[in-house]
Amino acid sequence: MEKLTPNEEEAMQAVWNSQNGTIKKFLEIIPEPKPPYTTLASTVKNLERKKFILGEKTGNTFSYTPLIKEEEYKKTFMGEFVNDYFSNSYKELVTFFANQEKISADDLKEIIKMIEKGNSHDA
């Protein structure tokens, strides 16, 4: 799977959020500052070429649906990110955010509960 550019990721996020839509619909979803319509149209065509989305013509309009699931994309590239920047250690990743005060003790407690709940299914 190819890593997307920031503009492609922003457009892909709009596709994932809508599950099916037109460039006009995606433009409504994208936060300010919004790209020009023609720029977004070009980005969407790149996503189609890269096989991240499927474009289908209905009348004079193209409608696009995701071919790659958001979770699948995140899983692939978060793994690479953790490997590249945190020596493949999720503990180092969490420690980094804790040290930067980007994650609170309450957040960490909630994460621990999620992990414990997930592990209880394995037993």
Image (tube, helix red, strand yellow):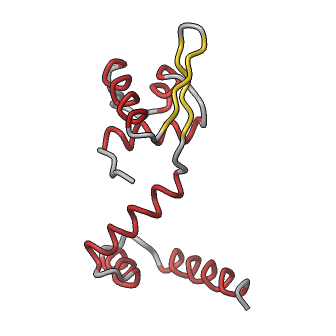
Nearest the camera: 119 or 101? Answer: 119
Residue at far left of view: 85
- Number of marks drawn: 0
Nearest the camera: 17 or 2? Answer: 2
Q: Position of residue 71 (x, y in %)?
A: 53, 57
Q: Position of residue 105 (x, y in %)?
A: 48, 80
Q: Position of residue 36 (x, y in %)?
A: 32, 21
Measured along the vertical axis of the image, is residue 52 above or below residue 42? below
Q: In the displayed structure, does residue 114 sit left or right of residue 102?
A: right
Residue drawn where x is 36% and y is 28% of the image = 34
Q: Position of residue 112 (x, y in %)?
A: 57, 83
Residue drawn where x is 35% and y is 32% of the image = 46
Residue at far bottom of view: 123
Residue drawn where x is 33% and y is 47% of the image = 4
Q: Which of the 4 image quadrants contains residue 96?
A: bottom left
Measured along the vertical axis of the image, is residue 107 above or below residue 57? below
Residue at far top of view: 60
Q: Which of the 4 image quadrants contains residue 58?
A: top right
Q: Quadrant where the N terminus lies?
A: bottom left
Nearest the camera: 30 or 75? Answer: 75
Q: Which of the 4 image quadrants contains residue 9?
A: top left
Q: Quadrant where the C terminus lies?
A: bottom right
Nearest the camera: 108 or 28? Answer: 28
Q: In the displayed structure, does residue 4 sit left or right of residue 115?
A: left
Residue drawn where x is 66% and y is 80% of the image = 118
